[in-house]
Image (cartoon, grey):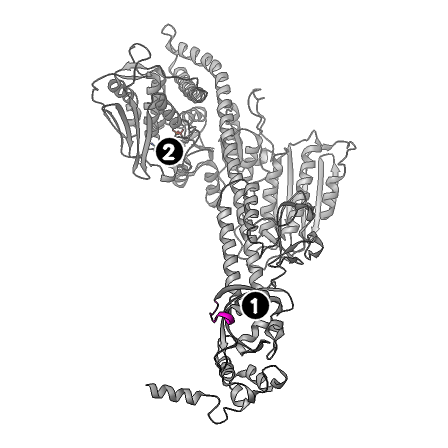
Amino acid sequence: MLVSWLEVCVAADPSTGPDRTHADGLFSGGGEAGRLMAAHDWAATSVGPVQEWPASLRYAVRTVLASRFPMVLTWGPEFVQFYNDAYTPFIGAKHPAIGEDIRRTLAEGWAALSGPVEHAMATCEASWLPRLPLLLERAGYREETYFTVSHAPAFGDDGRVAGMHAVCTEVTAEVLGERRQQLLHDLSCTQAHRGDEAAVLAGLCRTLGSDPLDVPFAAVYLDGDGGLRRAGTVGCPPGSLPAHVPDAGALPGPVAGLGLVGGFWQDPVRDAVVLPLGGGAGEERIGVLVAGVSPNRALDAEYRTFLDLVAGQFASGLGTARAFEAERRRAESLAELDRAKTAFFSDVSHELRTPLTLLLGPISDVLADPADPLPPSARDQLELALRNGQRLQRLVDDLMDVASIEAGRAGAVRVPTDLAAFTAELAGVLRAATERAGLRLSVDCPPLDRPVHVDPRMWEKVVLNLLSNAVKYTFVGGIQLVLRGEPDQVVLTVTDTGIGIPADELPRVFDRFHRVQGSLARHREGTGIGLALVRELAGLHGGTVTVASEPGAGSTFTVAVPYGSPDAPADPVAPSSAAHGTAASWVADVTPDELPPAPAGATATVLVVDDNADMRTYLTRLLAPIWRVRTCTDGEEALAAVAEEQPDVVLTDVMMPRVDGFELLRRLRADPATRAIPVIMLTARAGQEAAVEGFTAGVDDYLAKPFRADELIARVRVALQRGSGGSAQLPPGRPEPVAPRAATAPEVRVLVPASRPPVPPRPATAPAVHRERWRFPAVAQSVPALRRALRRLFSTAGLDDDQAYDLLLAACEAATNAVEHAQQPTEPFVDVTAEVTTTEVVVTVRDHGQWRERVPSMDRGRGSTLMGAVGEVTAVPGPEGTTVTIRSPRTSPPPRPGG
Ligand code: ADP
């Protein structure tokens, strides 16, 4: 083993083997560096000609050249350097520097290197300098670089230190990468802290300031005030940058003039980049980040990506802060709205109580007067009125209760109560309604061993609300009410086999005014305060209410109250008249309608669709003497009834469970077999806006509750005449004259479209001409409806977005004029036609009045300027009204047929 090692050493001795003494042999295999060394005039240097080099230098040089690791060797007191190809990139433009004094080549970094080099040479102890920052000017600027270096002594033939061997590796990319990664991590931690926008921005700027080597200075500008406003700076006096600029282009890119310094050696900062904050696809831009570029680093792809990521962190932090703030404001305004609603209901309820008392009192007296009994039909009607008056009263009472509990005015007056007996009695009050609804009611209230102290009226509300909800939301199965005494509380559970409540709704069902959207119920009526009231009332007794539910399987509401102590002496308790009223309403609601026989000679059938049983009864009573009447409780039932036998007219409510009035209308219109059936809508949503909505949905007529009996009959008659082709006797768009309305009735006119838009069979290819015609009530609320209708038409016709937008503006301006200026119209409508052909778009707006003389005003002519900008506008006034025509050449080609 020893022998072979010696052999190897001898064979490797550059002074012995063939050609090894020759300079070429010494440098061969050393690549470019070897060739440079071979060509170098060593005789002119302090190390002398190659032939005279000591063996130790030859060995050392050979080691350097043979290594693929970056190595540099210096020899002699003048630090003459020898390096290999792997080392050349480190000195960049200074290469070739073979044979030069290393102290000159690395002049800018020598201050940092001389100490460890001298130490290694003096003590023979190798240095170890990980991540040594070095200033290099290899790329034409003062560059921040990092090297891990080890210096070791190089020995001469006499065994004394004759030079220095250095092995080094550049770690600039790692050092910068880690540093930048750390900053990005810190920024993401900072932006995770919740706060308002200013606090988040200040935090982000502070964190950004922790890495001045990568971002010597920065400024954040936010969009607003018609430009960009400086909102934060770091690493520079705020005043060194403008406070406000019109756009990002006005922000400085070259920043040498700002006199800022930065980087590892505090050199002047010359460049900055302006990066958008947000503004990616589907995102709104928040502002921009101006980030200074280190004078000691080139703005290469990595640096740019890093700065983009910094901007991303700012955008995300500020975006989240804004969203958070918007959410907080939304929650605040909702709470405010909620308070305002409660206050409003409370005020209104007060006002309603007096007239309600004065209505219900006399009705009850008349009904109860034995001396003067009423004929059966009058009795039926008054009972209907009484029942619904009481329903209103209960609603008003509930609202008042909620309001006074909220205001801290309500307090429970607890009396010792046999809660088992009282609860069972309350359940009994609802038994008839439950059973008529086809549900089983099981009541399990064994006697308790002691009285419970509750406010009887409040407990009654708790029980009745829970039972009423159970009836309302259960269609098959049953309801079970259980009351149990536990050691320190009494627990009431009401379990149903109804529709159940989705898990995500459970936390909110006890909130005031909260209703689960789309719940299938026996009727749509309700205010969403029943369960809120139960919770408040239980709370006033020191108790709680909870719910467990599974959609499709049912719900269990559990109320627990302590036995409590008395506030007043015992008083016999019994269900109140309000409880009996609730029960009577439910009986009416769940009892199938009794339809009177059709009158002799009746030729037409009216289908009445309403979820309120009393309303169906009332409508039936009004219509049945004239026409044959059928009834349905919601839109879904109505569709089935229409499929079975077509009525001549449909009279429908709007708000109903399952399929509401608008959906019913849509489905009737969508089916060619039912498209022609006239539909009249009845709704509690008074006001012209609702009327406009009804008309754009294609309804034939519209009647707001409360309405008068004769008006209803007149409307049905008109609809029937039109439906049977009798429209010739009635000019389109004209209401049948009706008696003047009561002053309190909401102002709703019979608004008949000039003609129901014909529904042509769907063409196989896109038609070349798109034409539609609408008639709108001459009220301001029609303008949004017109805008919607036009937008739909323009989109179907494939009109270019910009042109469609301009035309919408112009047409709405013309319609606004028609509404505002037409005096004494012969008809209270505005007629609009729109036609899109392959070459042009024509919109006409016609009113039916005289235009008054225009008063000079500031905005005079604004409308015509606006319209004129879109196309050719003509206004033709006439005794019957004015027609404004907007004509605009089509700017985009029509879509390809079938495309
Ligand atoms: P509402 O007047 O709407 O009935 P409530 O406060 O009584 O108001 O109830 C709030 C909501 O909780 C209801 O709109 C309904 O969606 C749901 N809900 C209440 N009770 C039941 C029940 N027994 N089964 C299913 N859903 C229920």
Identify the residue shown where x is 60% and y is 62%.
297
Name the spot of residue 862 as percent of width and height, x first: 74, 40
Give the position of the C terminus as an image quadrant.
bottom right
Residue type for callout 1? Ser
Q: Nearer the viewer, residue 894 or 321?
A: 321
Badge count: 2
Circle 1 sits on which residue?
A: 114
**Mark 2 Cα within 10 Å, few/some/many (few <14, many 20+)?**
many
Residue 656 showing in the rendered view: yes
| Ligand 1 within 8 Å of the CB at mark 2 | yes
The answer to whether residue 841 is magenta is no
Provide the secondary structure element on which disc 1 rests: helix
Viewer-nearest of discs 2 and 1: 1
Q: Nearer the viewer, residue 476 or 409?
A: 409
Residue type for callout 2? Ala
Q: What are the residue bounds of the magenta stretch? A: 120-127
Circle 2 sits on which residue?
A: 521
Q: Compared to 803, does 445 lie above or below?
A: above
Q: Quadrant of residue 457?
A: top left
Name the spot of residue 656 as percent of width and height, x first: 43, 34
Q: Quadrant of residue 97?
A: bottom right
Name the spot of residue 878 as percent of width and height, x first: 74, 36
**Mark 1 Cα within 10 Å, few/some/many (few <14, many 20+)?**
few
